[in-house]
Image (cartoon, coloured by chain):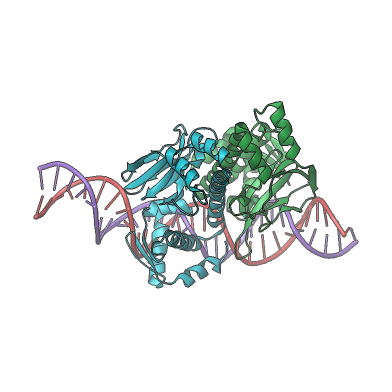
Chain colours: A cyan, B green, C purple, D red
DNA sequence: CGCGCCGTTGATATTATTCAAGACCAGTGG
DNA sequence: CCACTGGTCTTGAATAATATCAACGGCGCG
């Protein structure tokens, strides 16, 4: 498991106890839901490999992508509030997931203050993640939003030990657009523009970041 | 304290223990910060009367309003992640706040499963609150966003036992705009338009909702 | 009383969406 | 193996939504 994750700093005994409550890995093919909106909430899910998107559905059946989750991320927190999942999580490629039964996690975290602390950290990080996204979507123009998206992915891949300058987008243009509050054509245009300015190289879903500085500059360049 | 709040369902003993760790009320005049971005995180704050906004600041010094908190809300969760507050909370009128030291709350919640559960609920609700706002800002046109804002306030005031059709906006047009991802002029225009259509009556900060159905209809009317 | 923020409204400019067409690609079935 | 299909992506032109600029009235506070 990962640095920013539940077992951080736990002793070997505690670690073993935590392991014992984690179920075996489950596999999800591309497009399969890990959980659906309305499902009874019983567990968190740790992504061991692959990736997922989380989406909320508006009354009109409109889908809004609220998260793009990579290996090492934990998803499912949204269900804690009222015992049912408020969003759905869908696998974006072949994905392996470990189920962490939440009732038992709560129980164990009563005995292990450090585990409790880590759980709280995870919950809080989810909050700041969302608020950050809110800042991006609410206050930046589209160009800066896409630049932010790319740079944030870059950083997340680096944290995971992968290349921070070349990676595959598992989201479609439409999904990226939904995530960033714009239309798919706009996403496409901006990626093309970034490429023509020499900031990135993009071929379908494969991005290579060529000029991180310039991308950063785009972000602060103009308000909205 | 309130229904959706920490002491829900606790016995009288547990209640007393919880009370014992809550500090006396503090008062904040309009414009005063309850906590600032970068402050060391030590406590949550329960709003007993009045209201606050929470804002995050981008690198460019741009302010994004991420929350509008009324009496009964608890704020400060954002600091749990890394021990420092990620946003600032500012009083919008004369406001009374109770400080809840977080370390002691964690400790107590290890002994009281129900308290633990309530704490987790609060954290999770904060997450779904943000994701809902994301849906609003990311996928609705400005008209629907403002309608959603008014209806959500209506509901929150009702939950608190106040009039759900007449209330005072403690946020300026600029703050509302920031919260909803639009410009202050746009907010002003939309409120005027709603008024001229007979949906609301607005005089400065005082709103009266006249046609809830029509406001609801506006929301689903069109995507973006 | 005067000054600074707040709010409204109109005219104009810009940004982003919509509509439309075509290229590309992967999967499917003949 | 190839043609077919449906989804994805790109790009252009027209259009609609929203921001910007500007002027002014009003309110609250010192």
State left or right for residue B135 relative to residue B184: left
State left or right for residue A188 relative to residue B81: left
- Picture quarter containing residue B217? top right
The structure residue drawn at horizontal position 37% and vertical position 57%, both measured from the top left corner, is: A169
Total tally of numbered discs in the picture: 0
**Residue A143 at what x, y percent from top left?**
48, 63
**Residue A123 at what x, y percent from top left?**
55, 46
- Picture quarter containing residue B152? top right
Q: Is residue B5 visible?
A: yes
Q: Is residue B192 visible?
A: no
Instruction: Say which of B198 and B67 sits in front.
Output: B67
State left or right for residue D7 relative to residue B146: left
**Residue B102 at what x, y percent from top left?**
67, 45
**Residue B27 at what x, y percent from top left?**
80, 46
Q: Quadrant of the C terminus of chain A?
A: bottom right
- Picture quarter containing residue B183? bottom right
In the image as oriented, which residue stretches furthest toward the front? A13
State left or right for residue D11 relative to residue B184: left
The structure residue drawn at horizontal position 65% and vertical position 27%, both measured from the top left corner, is: B9
Q: Is residue B167 above or below residue A53?
A: above
């Amino acid at each position: 498991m990962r640095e920013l994750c539940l077992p951080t700093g736990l002793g070997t005994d505690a670690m073993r106890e935590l392991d014992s409550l984690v179920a075996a890995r489950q596999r999800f093919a591309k497009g399969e839901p890990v959980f659906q909106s309305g499902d009874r909430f019983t567990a968190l899910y740790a992504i061991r490999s692959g990736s997922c998107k989380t989406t909320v559905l508006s009354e009109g059946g409109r889908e809004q992508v609220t998260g793009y989750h990579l290996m090492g991320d934990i998803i499912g927190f949204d269900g804690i509030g009222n015992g049912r999942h408020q969003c759905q999580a869908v696998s974006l490629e072949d994905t392996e997931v470990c189920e962490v039964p939440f009732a038992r996690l709560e129980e164990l975290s009563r005995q292990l203050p450090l585990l409790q602390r880590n759980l709280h950290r995870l919950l809080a990080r989810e909050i700041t993640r969302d608020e950050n996204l809110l800042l991006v979507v609410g206050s930046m123009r589209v160009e800066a939003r896409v630049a932010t998206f790319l740079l944030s992915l870059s950083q997340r891949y680096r944290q995971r030990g992968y290349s921070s300058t070349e990676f595959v987008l598992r989201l479609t243009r439409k999904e990226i657009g939904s995530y960033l509050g714009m239309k798919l054509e706009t996403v496409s245009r901006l990626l093309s523009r970034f490429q023509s300015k020499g900031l990135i190289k993009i071929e379908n879903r494969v991005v290579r970041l060529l000029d991180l500085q310039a991308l950063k500059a785009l972000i602060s360049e103009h308000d909205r």
